[in-house]
Amino acid sequence: MTLNARTLLSGVLTVLLAYFVLTAPASAAKFTRGLLDQLALAARSGMTFLQHLGT
């Protein structure tokens, strides 16, 4: 049975994420909120850019 790098990396990231959430839930929530805010800002900026292309 061979493990490829993607499977191994996915497992390691899942374990680290679970550890982070269980040991520091407030920090994990703050990090997640900040990440989602940045994604929303990027989407909003992209939409503004596309709207200005049409005018």
Image: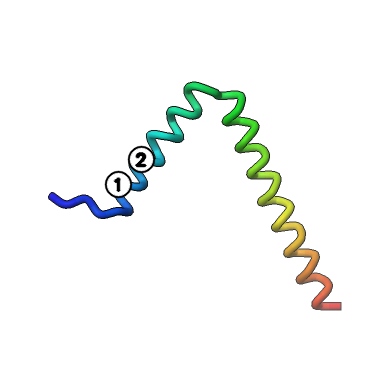
Indicate the amino acid at tag 2. Val
> SS at mark 2?
helix
At x 70% / y 51%, what residue is drawn? 40
Drawn side of residue 19 relative to residue 38, left or right: left
Asked which quadrant contains residue 47, the reply is: bottom right
Q: Residues within 10 Å of mark 2 (few under 14, many from 20)?
A: few
> SS at mark 1?
helix
Q: Which mark is residue 8?
A: 1
Q: Where is residue 12 in the image (x, y as percent from the top left)?
A: 36, 40
Asked which quadrant contains residue 55, the reply is: bottom right
Q: Where is residue 19 in the image (x, y as percent from the top left)?
A: 43, 28
**Residue 6 drawn above or below residue 23:** below
At x 49% / y 21%, what residue is drawn? 23
Give the color scheme: rainbow, by chain, secondary structure or one colour: rainbow
Whether residues under marks 2 and 1 lie with C-beta atoms below 8 angstroms apart, the answer is yes
Q: Where is residue 8 in the image (x, y as percent from the top left)?
A: 30, 47
At x 42% / y 34%, what residue is drawn? 16
Q: How far apart are marks 2 and 1 (CA)?
A: 6 Å
The answer to which of 55 and 42 lies nearer the viewer is: 42
* Residue sitting at the far top: 23
Q: Which mark is residue 49?
A: none
Residue annotated with mark 2: 12
At x 36% / y 46%, what residue is drawn? 10
Q: Residues within 10 Å of mark 1 (few under 14, many from 20)?
A: few
